[in-house]
Amino acid sequence: MNWTTTTPIPDEFIKGALELERTAQGILPHRLPAKARAQANNDPQLLMAESQPSGVRVAFRTDATELELETMRSRATYSGAPARPDGIIELVVNKEVVGCSTTSGGNTTTIDMATGVARRDVGAACTSRFANLPEGAKDVELWLPHNETTELIALRANAPLEVAPPNGLPVWLHHGSSISHGSNATRPTATWPAVAARRGGVELVNLGFGGSALLDPFTARTMRDTRADVISIKIGINLVNLDLMRLRAFGPAVHGFLDTIRDGHPTTPLLVISPIHCAIHEDTPGPGAFDMEALAAGRMQFMATGDPAETAAGKLTLRVIRGELERIVRERSASDGNLHHLDGQELYGGADAVELPLSDALHPDAATHQLMGERYAQLAFAAGAPLSRSEVSNG
């Protein structure tokens, strides 16, 4: 095969990342810039989450019929817990998903859940190969694994590659928790934000960070400084399951987060989404914890450990947060006509939980991600909806 090798991969090929770090092997996409990461107190959960390229893709135009992408993955596993599935790289040609490749090798950190001790094993790079692409010029995207830190080493093709022309789509900047990050989705194009973006005709920049949608000021400043045509934030579940703050702090923190975004996007359509239904935290505060009996039986399951009576002292539950977010947006929208609210239970509610229960009591499964993405596309991006193209034009 007469390969044309592109290394390093041009910055212009990488979409959905906010910063690209040059490593000894290639490029590491980040979804938070270095300045924000430096303010995270070296929190391992956030640093892992933001380096996992949910929504990030390598995009280009080519006549090639065969491609190879060489990557080095880093992943974390927990001893005693069910093994996490391997990552997937998906091939999208002219907006259609036409192939996928499972990742392998790489670096694995295994954490002992009883002691917290971590062991790191180093493996080889992975080459994902895609053949039999259609003849002629085409727009290609390689969607990176949403659940694995992924260094990009080289891109090879049997024809030259060039920067894809602008597609003219509005940029959707979204922030949320592990649910937005894509936990328990099976493919990178099958996370609910990816489903919604592809159906809604927008360019996704996904700042969904597993365990880390915590109203952090550095995340708000990042959103303030990031180009966007429409914006959404989905807030609540992490604040409850980490038992991070009380009601007195929550309201001012939401106001501050929105104020910061508005400093950079004063009139951009902005949608605030409250939590989806999650039975364990509807009326029971956090903190959340692993259900050790379920783990002993080989199942990953979460549980709430708080006392419902503690809500009288200001502890947060999902029901409390939904009420507060609705009130805050209603009051602010009197002077901000481009600020909107969406009850997360319209994406996934109590009735849905009967038909499609959360697989680990916390995260949606693949079918639920699809359902949520389809619903969001209709509720947010359809004609007349808060983030529709008409709203972009009016804003």
Image (spheres, rainbow, N blue to C red):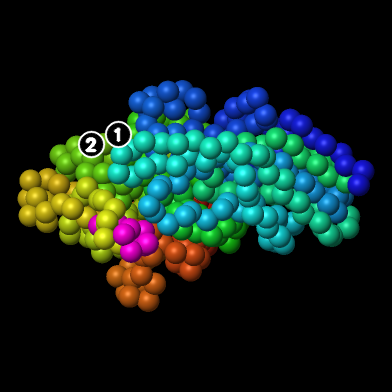
Residue at image position (51%, 48%) is: 147
395 or 177, which lies in front? 177
In the rendered structure, the answer to whether residue 116 lies left or right of residue 375 reads left
Of the residues shown, which amino acid type is indicated by label 2?
Answer: Pro
Residue contact between numbered discs 1 and 2, judged by CB atoms under 8 Å: yes
Q: Does the segment drawn in magenta span residue 58?
A: no
In the rendered structure, the answer to whether residue 394 lies left or right of residue 291 reads right
The quarter of the picture where residue 46 lies is top left
Magenta region: 295-303
Number of numbered discs on residues: 2
Q: Is residue 130 above or below residue 259?
A: below
Of the residues shown, which amino acid type is indicated by label 1?
Answer: Gly
The quarter of the picture where residue 119 lies is top left
Q: Is residue 322 above or below residue 40?
A: below
Residue at image position (52%, 41%) is: 108
In the rendered structure, the answer to whether residue 62 lies left or right of residue 380 reads right
The answer to whether residue 5 is visible is: yes
The quarter of the picture where residue 291 lies is bottom left
x and y percentages locating residue 56 in the rendered image: 59, 44
Indicate the secondary structure of the residue bearing disc 2: helix
x and y percentages locating residue 234 in the rendered image: 37, 49
Indicate the secondary structure of the residue bearing disc 1: helix
Q: Which residue is mark 1?
A: 256
x and y percentages locating residue 50 in the rendered image: 48, 38
Residue at image position (92%, 43%) is: 2
In the picture, the disc for residue 252 is 2
